Image (spheres, grey):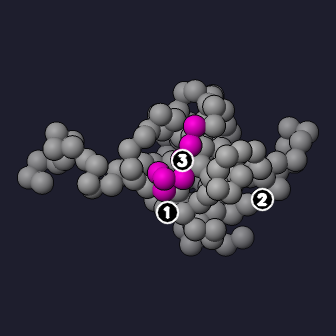
């Protein structure tokens, strides 16, 4: 597939931390319960850590108890690419950023109690978080704001 953002592996290596490169470009998985965004509860938007594309809104995040940030739907269906993943001797659905092809995590049909029934299980390292301006406290705002 051709992506709107396309870079060489050397460019990705130079732009991402070693840990991010392993997850985003080599489909590694961060250890559960270690991600910085697992307990993020502010209103805002989650974007691809590789290219900045909007992926998830905070209102779709829920505590699935799995150890990774979980969402019940993407910001738009076309924001993510879903691919069959048969690695590790099982069939899963891999989730990639549709803008740059970076690995984000997997989606499972076990989001019980959510509007969609889906659980997008994402690696914190694959995401960046931008809080809504209205939720940023005065001590978090940049000088002169």
Disc 3 marks which residue? 61
Q: Is residue 42 left or right of residue 3?
A: left
Nearer the N terminus, badge 3 or badge 2?
3
Could you say whether the residue bearing mark 1 is in a helix, strand or loop?
Answer: loop
Is 62 within the magenta? yes
Between the residue at mark 3 and the residue at mark 1, the CA separation in whole angstroms equals 17 Å
Q: Dot 1, how many residues are within 10 Å of its Cα: few (below 14), some (14-19), or many (20+)? A: some
Q: Which residue is mark 2?
A: 83
Dot 2 or dot 1: first in sequence order is 1
Instruction: Indicate the quadrant containing the N terminus: top left, top right, bottom left or bottom right.
Output: bottom right
**Residue 34, quarter of picture:** top right
Q: Can you say whether 4 is above or below 135 in the image?
A: below
Which mark, by number, is residue 126?
Answer: none
Provide the residue designation for mark 1.
53
Q: Which type of secondary structure does the marked residue at label 3 adopt?
A: strand
Identify which residue is drawn at 16% across, 39% down.
139
Question: Separation of disc 3 and disc 2 at Cα?
Answer: 22 Å
Q: Residue 137 or 23: which is nearer the viewer?
A: 137
Spatial separation of the CA atoms under disc 2 and disc 1: 18 Å
Above or below residue 105? Residue 68 is: above
Cβ–Cβ below 8 Å for labels 3 and 2?
Answer: no
79 or 103, which lies in front? Answer: 79
**What span is colored magenta in the figure?**
57-63
* Image quarter (top left, top right, bottom left or bottom right) of the C terminus: bottom left
């Amino acid at each position: 597939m051709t992506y709107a953002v396309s870079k060489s592996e050397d460019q990705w290596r130079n732009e991402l931390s070693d840990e991010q490169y392993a997850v985003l470009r080599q489909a590694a998985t961060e250890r559960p319960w270690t991600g910085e965004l697992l307990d993020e509860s502010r209103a805002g938007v989650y974007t691809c850590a590789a290219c900045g594309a909007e992926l998830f809104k905070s209102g779709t995040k829920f505590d699935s108890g799995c150890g990774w940030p979980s969402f019940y739907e993407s910001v738009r269906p076309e924001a993510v690419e879903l691919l069959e993943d048969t690695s590790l001797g099982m069939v899963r659905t891999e989730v990639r950023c549709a803008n740059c092809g970076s690995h984000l995590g997997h989606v499972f049909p076990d989001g019980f109690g959510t509007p969609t029934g889906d659980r997008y299980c994402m690696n914190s390292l694959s995401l960046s978080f931008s809080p809504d301006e209205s939720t940023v406290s005065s001590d978090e705002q940049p000088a002169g704001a």
